[in-house]
Amino acid sequence: MVRELVHDPFLLARKSVPATKDDLPIAHDLLDTLVAHWDTCAGMAANMIGQTKRIIVFNDQGSLVTMLNPEILKAEGEYKTEEGCLSLLGGPRKTKRFQKIKVRYENLDFQVRIKTFTGWTAQIIQHELDHCNGILI
């Protein structure tokens, strides 16, 4: 189900808690909401739809990916950039990102995965993990 987006910075600044099997409907709603905003959004975190759970979804070179309880294990190649956000009104904001990240996460079957991402996909993941950590760009 497509959910309404949250724009309240106070709500978006709340840290997310780990996702459980009971939260799988949130993951599906988040994915539906991303698809509904496909033309203006490359990724979303659950707090963007009002759920403070560690769930993110994103476009990985044309494939939709859902991560439960993601965490960055390693980051390399720091750079500065500007990003916009569907939940935050106003223009792009300056932020720091890393070119290459190693992420530990669980898939929808709660199987642990570790994968390295680079470039634009790494940037999207970092943005969504900031959401999970209550960090607003």
Image: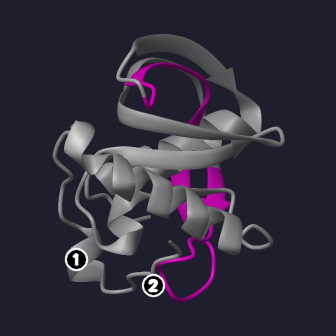
Q: Position of residue 86 (x, y in %)?
A: 57, 76
Residue 23 at x, y percent in the picture:
27, 49
What amino acid type should be assigned to the residue bearing mark 2? Glu
**95 displayed left or right of 38:** left
Q: What element carries label 2?
A: loop
Q: Residues within 10 Å of mark 1 (few under 14, many from 20)?
A: some
Residue nearest the viewer, comparing 57 with 74: 57
Q: Is residue 34 visible?
A: yes
**Amino acid type, residue under disc 1 in the picture:** Leu
Viewer-side label of 2, 1 = 2
Mark toward the start of the polypeptide (2 vs 1): 2
Residue beneath label 1, please? Answer: 11
Depth order, front residue of 116/28: 28
Which range is magenta? 81-108
Q: What residue is shown at x 74% (from left), y 32% (from top)? A: 119
Quarter location, residue 78:
top right
Picture quarter with the C terminus: bottom left
State the residue at coordinates (25%, 37%).
21
Residue assigned mark 2: 4
